[in-house]
Image (spheres, rainbow, N blue to C red):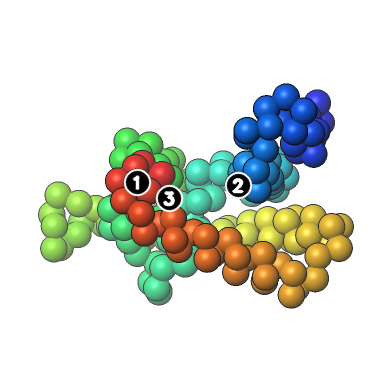
Amino acid sequence: MKNNHRVADIVDLCEQHWRESDSAAHRYILHLHRLSNVEAMLAEPVMAQFGLSMTEFDVLATLRRSASPYVLSPTDLQRSTLLSSGGQTKVLYQLEDRGLVRRSVDHQDKRSKLVHLSRKGRTLIEKAMAAVLDCISGGMERAGMSVQEIEQLTGLMGKLLAALETTSTVEDSDV
C-alpha cells in the first residue's frame, strides 16, 4: 500500500482530468474501498499470528456470533460470509482437520451437515477477534476519532447499507 496513490491524490487527479467523476459519491467509494483494503492489510498479519486466514476467521466469527451452542447449517453460514459453496466446503474441511469446527448430520435434512464451533475454535476466534479489534481500534485512536465519531460514522454507513441492501440489485447479486 505504501506505493499506492493516496486517496487525496486520486481525488485531485479526478478533479483535474475527469471532472464528471468528481462527486461526493465517488470520493465516498474511493475512501471506503481504500479503507477496507488498508484494514484488511493490517488485520491479516494479526490473524496469521493465530494461524487463520481471512476466510477462516470469517467462518469462525460467523459461527461464534450465532446463538449458543454456535451451530449453523451450511446455508446459514454461507449467508453471513462471502464464500461460494465450494469454497466454504474447502474451508470447513481445513477447520475440521484442525479441530476448530466439527460437523454432524442435520436430522431435518440428512443431506446436509451442521457446522459446530468447537471449544478450541471458540477459544481461538475469541482471542483472534480481540487482537484484530485492538489493531483496528489503534488506527482509530491514531486518527483521533472519538467513540461518538465512530458511532456516528457507523450509523451513517448503516443507514446507507440499509437502503442499498433492500434493492433487488444487491439481493440478486453474489455480494
Image quarter in which the C terminus is found: top left
Q: Are marks 1 and 3 in contact (CB under 8 Å)?
A: no
Badge 2 amino acid: Ala
Q: Is residue 62 visible?
A: no
Disc 3 versus disc 2: nearer the observer:
2
Q: Is residue 123 above or below residue 94?
A: below
Separation of residues labelled 2 and 1 (CA atoms): 18 Å
Find residue 133 and report its image quarter.
Answer: bottom right
Disc 2 is placed on an element classified as helix
10 Å crowding of disc 3: few (<14), some (14-19), many (20+): some
Q: In the orientation shown, which residue stands out farthest toward the front?
A: 20
| Circles 2 and 1: CB atoms closer than 8 Å | no
Q: Front-most of 133 and 158?
A: 158
Q: Amino acid at mark 1?
A: Thr
Residue 129 placement: quadrant: bottom right
**Residue carrying label 2:** 25
In the image, residue 147 lies at what x, y percent? 75, 73
Horizontal side, residue 10 vs residue 56: left or right: right
Q: Residue at x 41, y 57 (%)?
A: 165
x, y (%) of residue 83?
40, 42
**Of residues 123 and 87, which is closer to you in this image?**
87
Horizontal side, residue 25 vs residue 148: left or right: left
Residue at which label 1 appears:
169
Q: From this view, report whether residue 57 is shown above or below residue 16.
A: below
**Residue to which mark 3 is pinned:** 81
At horizontal 30% and vertical 46% (from top left) the residue drawn is 172
Q: Earlier in the sequence, mark 1 or mark 3?
A: 3
